[in-house]
Amino acid sequence: MHSYLNVKKSAATSDVFWDITEEAGLFDIVVKGLGDGVHRSVDTGREFLNMSSYSYLGLDTHPALVQAAADAVLAEGALNTSTSRMRVRFESLRNAEDALCELWDAEVVTVASCAAAAWATLPLLASGLFTDGEPPLMVFDRNAHFCLNAMKPSVADEAEVTTIRHNDVAALEDLCKKHKQVAYVADGVYSTGGQAPVRDLLRLQETYGLFLFFDEAHGISTVGERGRGVVLTEMGAINDRTLIIISLNKGFGSSGGAVLLGPRGSSRRRTLAIRNGGPIMWSQRINTAGLGATLASAELHRTAELATLQQRLQDVIDLFDSQVETEQRGDGLPIRHVNLGDEELTVRLAKGLLEHGYYTSPIFFPVIGRGKAGLRLMLRANMHKSDVEEFCEVLNRQWDQLR
C-alpha cells in the first residue's frame, strides 16, 4: 500500500495550510468578471486583478471565441450528444479535431480536460501498445504534474514504475542503457516554473529509442509558430516515439484538452486510443460551445494576431523580470514562482497583495515540494504596463517587509 499515493497523509499535511488560506480570504472567491483578468468579489465588492490566471494570451475573453461558442450551440441546438463519442458525435467535434490536426500536423483527439488526457493515455503507453507490445519502464520526473503522478497506481498495474530527480538527464540515460524500452513522463513547461530539457531528451530518444510523454498544458499557444509550444518547437514535428497532452483551456483559450498521438495520419494509434483510452471512450467530451471556441481559436492561431499576442506576452514577461527576481527570470515563459519557503509567510504576503487589488495563488505541499511554499504568478498578454509595474512595486515592498 501507498507505494505511489497516500491521500490521507497528503490531506492531513496540507489541510492546515488550506485552512489559513481560506481564513485569509484567498480561497473560494466568488466573482463577477470585468474583463482582462479583472474581477469583482460578489461577497465583498472588492475589485482585483488576477495575477494567477493561466489565460496567457487573454483568448478566453476574445470576442471571436466568445461569439463562436455561442454560435455553435445555437447552430447545433444542443450542448452535447449525451452519448459516447465512439457511437454518436456532432460534426462540430470532427471539425474541431480536424482543425487541430491541421494546425499542428499531428493526429489529435480531444478530451474533456488535460487531466482526462493523462488518464486516457498513460495506461495505454504502459501496456506496451505504443512500444511494439513490450511494456516500457515508466520513468516519471519528480516534478511532473499531479495529474501525471496520480496515474502511477494504474500505470504500475501495467509496467514497472520509477521516479527520478527533476530534469536528471544523466539518471535517465543510465536507465536507457539498462532497459530495452523506456518511457519518460514529464511536463514540457512545469506548472511551478521552468521547462523540460527537451533537446537533451531528444538526444536520448535518437540514441536509445526513448519514448517521450509530455504534458504541455502550460506551453501550448504561448510560444512557437501556430502556438506549437516548447516541445513541438524544439522537435520540429512530432514523431511516433512521442505523445503530448495539452490543455485547450489555458493559452489556447477555449475548453477541454487534447492528445497529440503522433504524426498526422497515425490512424492505428488513434483507433487504439479511442477504443481503449478510458475517458475518451466513456467520459464527457468537450461540449458544443467549447468546440465552437476551439475552431475559432485554431483559426486565430493561423493568423498574424497570434504572433502579436505572443509578443505582448513576452513584453509583459520582460517587464516583470526587470522588476522582480525569481529563479525563472529570463526563460521567456509566463509562469513565475516567488519562493518564500514558509507557508504562513506566503499566505500573509498574498493577503497583503489582495488588499492592494492583486490576487495571487499561494502554493504549498503537495502542489509544490516541502520548503518551497510561495506565490505562483502567471503573466498574460492582456496585462497593462502600468498594472505590471504597480504590482511589482507592491510585491517588492511587501516582500521586503516580511523577510
Image (cartoon, rainbow, N blue to C red):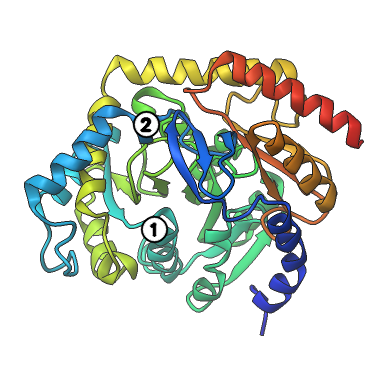
The quarter holding residue 11 reads bottom right
Q: Which mark is residue 117?
A: 1
Q: Is residue 276 above or below residue 94?
A: below
Q: Which residue is depicted at the point 80% across and 56% down?
A: 370
Residue toward you, 89 or 82: 82
Q: Is residue 327 left or right of residue 193?
A: right
Which three-letter amino acid code belongs to the residue tagged 1?
Ala
Which three-letter amino acid code belongs to the residue tagged 2?
Leu
Q: Is residue 346 above or below residue 149?
A: above
Which quarter of the image is occupied by the N terminus?
bottom right
- Is residue 101 in view from this perspective? no
Q: Identify the secondary structure beneath mark 1.
A: helix
Q: Which residue is depicted at the point 25% across and 39% down?
A: 293
Residue toward you, 344 or 351: 351
Residue most extreme to the bottom: 1
Please provide percent x and percent y for residue 116.
Answer: 40, 61
Q: Which residue is mark 2?
A: 59
Compute the Cα span from label 1 to label 2.
22 Å
Please provide percent x and percent y for residue 90.
Answer: 11, 55
- Is residue 176 in view from this perspective? yes
Q: Is residue 69 left or right of residue 41?
A: left
First along the sequence among labels 1 and 2: 2
Q: Is residue 81 above or below residue 193?
A: below
Of marks 1 and 2, the one in the foreground: 2
Please provide percent x and percent y for residue 257.
Answer: 36, 50
The quarter holding residue 364 reads bottom right
Please provide percent x and percent y for residue 392.
Answer: 71, 23
Which quarter of the image is occupied by the C terminus?
top right
Q: Identify the secondary structure beneath mark 2.
A: helix
Q: Is residue 16 above or below residue 46?
A: below
Residue toward you, 162 or 258: 258
